[in-house]
Image (spheres, rainbow, N blue to C red):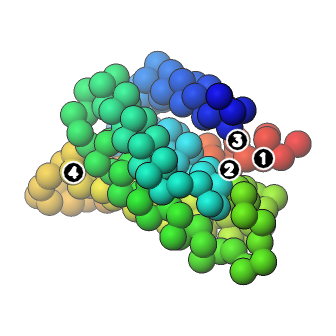
């Protein structure tokens, strides 16, 4: 096994434990829940195999679905984000960038990285809460859940990136 696979397994286990034991029990104002596990999908390097991204996304989704009692919601949402991530990440890179470049505050800069994680986290939260709710009768609560969870998740991701940067 390479160190990349070992690092991904450790990240996988840590994010699953943190999400299921701590973050699933946080509901700020009754609707904002941090969904930190998406951080793993956002961190795939430039030329990581697309099938590998989808496999990791699906496995992460299944484990989170199991511990969060959301059958299929997380898996479906993470699969869509995992399918979009390589193409969206390419939009932020120059042609002569390194082949194994990882998205981070250092590699992209603050503004590009913030936009990168904002769009993908917003896409994820929109899919997640749309599938979970599956109706639009209470659209204000739906929008509050999407907005609150997106903001909270982005703040946690930026905090982790800032700590990793040092």
Q: Which mark is residue 145?
A: none
Q: Quick check: marks 1 and 3 in contact, CB under 8 Å?
A: yes
Q: According to the image, label 3 marks what residue? A: 160
Q: Which mark is residue 158?
A: 2
Left/right placement of residue 67 relative to residue 166 reads left
Cβ–Cβ below 8 Å for labels 2 and 3?
yes
Q: Residue at left 72%, top 32%? A: 3
Secondary element at image label 3: helix
Q: In this orientation, which residue lies closer to the viewer: 4 or 35?
A: 4
Residue 103, image x, y percentages: 68, 58
Name the residue at 53% across, 54% down.
49
Q: Report which residue position mark 1 lands on.
A: 162
Q: Residue at x 62, y 34 (%)?
A: 5
CA gap between label 2 and label 3 equals 5 Å
Distance between the Cα atoms at labels 1 and 3?
Answer: 5 Å
Q: Tell me the element at label 4.
A: helix
Splitting the image into 4 quarters, where does residue 30 fall?
top left
Whole-angstrom CA distance, mark 4 to mark 3, is 28 Å
In whole angstroms, how far apart are the C-alphas of marks 2 and 1? 6 Å
Query: Upstream in the sequence, badge 4 or badge 2?
Result: 4
The Cα atoms of the two marked residues, 4 and 2, are separated by 26 Å
> Badge 4 is on which residue?
131
Q: How many residues crowd around disc 3 within 10 Å: few (fewer than 14), some, or many (20 or more)?
A: few
Q: Compare marks 4 and 1 and give the one earlier in the sequence.
A: 4
Q: Residues within 10 Å of mark 1 (few under 14, many from 20)?
A: few
| Residue at horizontal 46 percent and vertical 41 percent from the top | 56
| Residues packed near mark 2 inside 10 Å, few (<14), some (14 to 19) or many (20 plus) | some
């Amino acid at each position: 096994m390479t160190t990349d696979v070992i690092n991904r397994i450790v990240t996988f286990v840590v994010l699953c434990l943190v999400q299921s034991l701590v973050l699933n029990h946080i509901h700020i104002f009754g609707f904002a829940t941090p969904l930190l596990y998406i951080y793993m999908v956002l961190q795939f390097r430039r030329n990581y195999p697309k099938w590998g991204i989808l496999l990791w996304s699906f496995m992460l989704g299944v484990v989170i679905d199991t511990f969060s009692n959301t059958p299929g919601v997380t898996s479906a949402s993470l699969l869509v984000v995992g399918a979009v991530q390589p193409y969206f990440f390419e939009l932020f890179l120059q042609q002569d960038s390194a082949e194994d470049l990882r998205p981070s505050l250092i590699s992209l800069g603050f503004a590009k990285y913030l936009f990168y994680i904002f769009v993908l986290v917003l896409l994820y939260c929109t899919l997640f809460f749309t599938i979970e709710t599956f109706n639009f009768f209470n659209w204000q609560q739906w929008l509050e859940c999407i907005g609150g969870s997106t903001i909270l998740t982005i703040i946690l991701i930026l905090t982790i990136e800032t700590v990793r940067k040092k």
